[in-house]
Image (cartoon, rainbow, N blue to C red):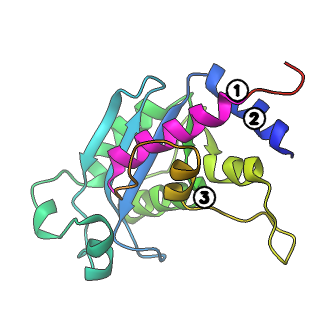
Amino acid sequence: MSRWTAIKKAKAWLDRAPLYLDTETTGLGPDAEIVEIAIVDADGRPLVNTLVRPQGEVPPDASRVHGLTTAMLQGAPTWAQIWPQIQAVMAGRLVLMYNAEYDVRLMRQTTERYGLAFDIPGVEFGDLLALYSEFKGVRGQDGDLRRWRLEHAGRELQIPMPNSHRALDDTLLTREVHRKIASQPLPWG
């Protein structure tokens, strides 16, 4: 894929009125779970924006990233309580994330932690991290495309929104990254 192919794909995704999703979690590993999730529509309207009470504790390292603590999450719904709403919102839709591999893995492992099925009829996931990396086209010494953090993409595309490491803000920033790439002109019109 080239820069032009990335722009063309961004435009095609935009035409599908995608949803945008981001999560905050208790960590990065196989036992991590979601503590916040936001999903916004193509116009940036929140469809889901909630804290999530985890089964385990929020480690200090994770709290330093997103500012959420175990105590702050005590009154929040559990993943089992909000999962049906999340499934319904995403069913049959294109859902874009900045680093979809991570967010999908965390949704799957959080869902399985509660003994629920990770089943979302007709959903399609798209990765804006991969798209932005293709758009930039910078390769490392190993020949692979360099991966860029969300805050870099926002800064590079001159989006005046911070990467706050909170789900709603980062979902809105992800949406703007997509829109900026899709707004780039193609050489053939």
Q: Amino acid at mark 2?
A: Ile
* 80 up-or-down from 147: above or below: above
Location of mark 2 (residue): 7
Residue 179 covered by magenta stretch:
yes
* 185 up-or-down from 27: above or below: above
SS label for mark 2: helix
Would you say the magenta stretch is mainly helix, strand or loop?
Answer: helix
Magenta stretch? Answer: 166-184
Location of mark 3 (residue): 101
Q: Residue at x 25, y 81 (%)?
A: 60
Q: Amino acid at mark 3?
A: Glu
Q: Is residue 11 left or right of residue 180?
A: right
Q: Residue at x 35, y 26 (%)?
A: 45
Q: Residue at x 26, y 72 (%)?
A: 63
Location of mark 1 (residue): 11
How far apart are the alpha carbons under marks 3 and 1?
21 Å
* 60 up-or-down from 74: above or below: below
SS label for mark 1: helix
Q: Residue at x 45, y 43 (%)?
A: 173
Q: Residue furthest bottom?
A: 60
